[in-house]
Amino acid sequence: MKSEKSSEKSENSTTVTVAENGPLIMNGSIEVTNHEGNKEVMTKAAFCRCGVSNNKPYCDGSQVAACFKG
Ligand code: FES
């Protein structure tokens, strides 16, 4: 997959930050549609990367007890 790097950030951009040993942290315009088709709109979200969250797809901090590395 090709990616482009840019140091510019537009006002309306959505950013994704990979937290060390933690979630994907998104800031910006975020719309999440669940498996039933229900939508949530938010400006900040932390998505689980470790797989042990009890609130998937969101992070609930469980990665700490699970000693997730990544
Ligand atoms: S990354 Fe936080 S619970 Fe999985």
Image (cartoon, rainbow, N blue to C red):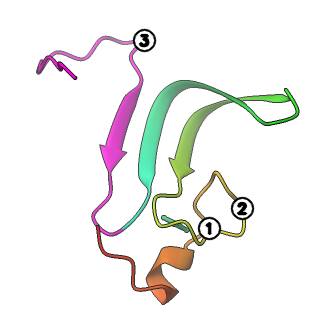
Q: Are marks 2 and 1 in contact (CB under 8 Å)?
A: yes
Disc 3 or disc 2, which is closer to the eye? 2
Relative placement, left or right, of 41 versus 15 is right
**Main SS class of the magenta portion in the image:** loop
Q: Which residue is mark 2?
A: 55
> How many angstroms separate mark 2 from mark 1 (CA)?
6 Å
Instruction: Say whether disc 2 or disc 1 marks the residue closer to the N-terminus.
Output: 2
Label 1 beta carbon less than 8 Å to ligand 1:
yes
Label 2 beta carbon less than 8 Å to ligand 1:
yes
Q: Which residue is mark 1?
A: 60
The magenta span reads: 1-21
Q: Amino acid at mark 3?
A: Asn
Relative placement, left or right, of 40 versus 28 is right
Q: Is residue 12 above or below residue 28?
A: above
Q: Nearer the viewer, residue 12 or 32?
A: 32
| Picture mark count | 3
Badge 2 crowding class, 10 Å Cα cut-off, few under 14, some 14 to 19, many 20 or more, is few
Q: Which residue is mark 3?
A: 12
Instruction: Say whether disc 1 or disc 3 marks the residue closer to the N-terminus.
Output: 3
